[in-house]
Image (cartoon, rainbow, N blue to C red):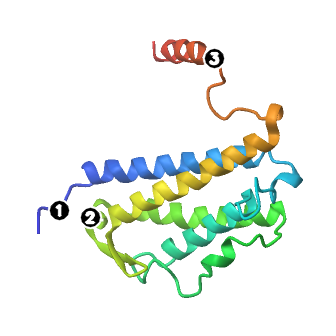
């Protein structure tokens, strides 16, 4: 065993960054979902593809399964029915928001409690051994991918009514000037 990493080391920097980035991913998804009309939540681009509702169901189910008993049990809880997450349960937007918030609270709550020494601990997900760092990286990629699917669908359904969640087209120069002025 090596020397324990101080609370100000690379591990702490990583955990703070992971937490901040995933809070940003959550906010991005929320910005997209706030723009949806009722008919958009359950609309899919084609038969068998995911709607925003299905993506929310899946994200919430995964977050509860992976992080609800983090480091205590296999990262695939026995009570989880993953296949059902991909079947539209017909939930209302309010119910979907409840699932969204509950899942993110579980995930972000665990991230906020982790310490650098935890990063090298091991856990299993579906019987596969991961370090905590690997598990976090796995979920960062997974959750970000699905949130970007939500953004894509919202933007597609809203068309010209879409309100950008980043720098608007043609506004990069102005944005950069404003950022430089704020730093000066």
Residue 137 in sight from this viewpoint: yes
Quadrant where the C terminus sits is top left
User: Of label 1 and label 3, which has the lower sequence position?
Assistant: 1
Out of 120 and 39, give the one closest to the viewer: 39
User: Could you tell whether 169 is left or right of 145 in the image?
Assistant: right
Residue 22 percent coordinates (x, y): 51, 51
Disc 3: which residue? 171
Which residue is situated farthest in the front direction here?
A: 47
Could you tell me how far apart the alpha carbons at marks 1 and 3 are, in whole angstroms? Answer: 47 Å
Disc 1 on helix, strand or loop? loop
Q: Is 156 on the left or on the right of 147, as rendered?
A: right
Q: CA distance from mark 2 to mark 3?
A: 43 Å
Mark 1 and mark 3 residues within 8 Å of each other at the beta carbon: no
Whole-percent x, y for residue 10 in the image: 26, 49
Residue assigned mark 1 = 4
Please tell me which residue lies in front, 61 or 160. 160
Q: Residue visible at 86% across and 48% down? A: 37
The residue shown at (62%, 46%) is 27
**Can you say whether 175 is above or below 157 in the image?**
above
Q: Mark 1: few, some, or many residues within 10 Å (few <14, many ≥20)?
A: few
* Front position in the image: 134 or 145: 145
| Disc 2 element | helix
Q: Which residue is mark 2?
A: 117
Give the mark nearest the N terminus, 2 or 3.
2
């Amino acid at each position: 065993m090596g020397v324990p990493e101080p609370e100000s080391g690379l591990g702490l920097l990583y955990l703070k960054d992971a937490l901040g980035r995933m809070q940003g991913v959550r906010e991005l998804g929320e910005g997209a979902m706030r723009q949806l009309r009722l008919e958009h939540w359950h609309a899919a681009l084609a038969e068998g593809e995911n709607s925003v509702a299905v993506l929310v169901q899946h994200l919430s189910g995964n977050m509860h399964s992976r992080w609800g008993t983090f480091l205590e049990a296999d990262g695939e809880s026995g009570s989880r029915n993953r296949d059902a997450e991909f079947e539209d349960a017909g939930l209302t937007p309010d119910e979907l928001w409840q699932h969204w918030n509950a899942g993110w609270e579980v995930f972000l709550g665990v991230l906020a409690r982790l310490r650098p020494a935890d990063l090298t601990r091991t856990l299993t997900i579906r019987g596969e051994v991961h370090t905590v760092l690997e598990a976090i990286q796995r979920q960062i990629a997974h959750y970000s991918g699905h949130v970007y699917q939500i953004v894509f669908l919202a933007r597609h359904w809203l068309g010209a009514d879409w309100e950008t969640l980043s720098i608007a087209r043609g506004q990069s120069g102005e944005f950069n000037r404003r950022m430089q002025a704020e730093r000066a």
